[in-house]
Amino acid sequence: MKKLPGSWSLPALVAAAALLAGCGVPPSATTPAAPAKASTAAVQKAVVQRVDTYFANEAKAPLGGSYQISTAALYKALQKNPNQFLLLDVRMPSGPATAPGYAQGHIGGAVNVPYPDLAKNLNKIKKLDQGRPIVTICYTGQWANQSEAILRLLGYNAYALHLSMSDWNQKTDILPPKHTVPNYPLVTGTKPGTFKP
């Protein structure tokens, strides 16, 4: 992970990145602010540089000019090497039938860090990624794309799973028509499990 300029803290940058990514979660009283010695101009410059880099490199991204990976491409890559990516499932641990959570079916090997807890788990993510590209996964792609943007702004090599679980398996498909969704394998329960094609 790249070092941040000046003394800008990771949680404060995550809050700024979240707002820039469009998730609309304002920093709370528990979110540490930038240290007093970092000027507002320095903080703004650091955030603007990261955002400019993000959008400048987006044109080179693999899927339609965005940092996404298709379900077919991910499945094929996992067949060759199940440990090639850190699979980061940002869905809630469980949910109703209309929005199945992690425990109700996830990609084998995926670790669950719910989107609302992403900022609190940056140290866990840093320990798990071991330099591997990260693939973020959610219900339909919105949380995955926002998580990918936040992680990229923090210096991680992250991609969002295009259409996420709604395009991975018919059991987790919440977007019609179901007949077009592949039936790629799932693991149930609260443990990551193992990817098995």
Image (cartoon, grey):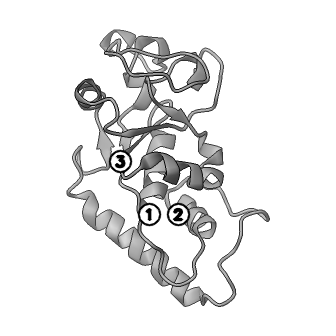
- Earlier-in-chain disc, 3 versus 2: 2
Task: Please provide percent x and percent y for residue 152.
Answer: 41, 58
Q: Quadrant of the N terminus?
A: bottom left
Residue beneath disc 1: 153
Residue type of the residue flagged with mark 1:
Leu
Which quadrant holds residue 70?
top left
* Label at residue 17: 2
* Residue lying at the far right of the rendered structure: 29
**Does residue 99 appear in the picture of this structure?**
no
> In the rendered structure, are the residues bearing label 2 and label 1 in contact, judged by CB atoms less than 8 Å apart?
yes
* Secondary element at tag 2: helix
Tell me the distance, in whole angstroms, between the alpha carbons under discs 2 and 1: 7 Å
- Earlier-in-chain disc, 2 versus 1: 2
> In the rendered structure, are the residues bearing label 1 and label 3 in contact, judged by CB atoms less than 8 Å apart?
no
Residue beneath disc 3: 132
Q: Left or right of 160: which side holds 117? A: right
Tell me the distance, in whole angstroms, between the alpha carbons under discs 1 and 3: 16 Å
Q: How many marks?
A: 3
**Does residue 120 appear in the picture of this structure?**
yes
In depth, the one of 139 and 132 nearer the eye is 132
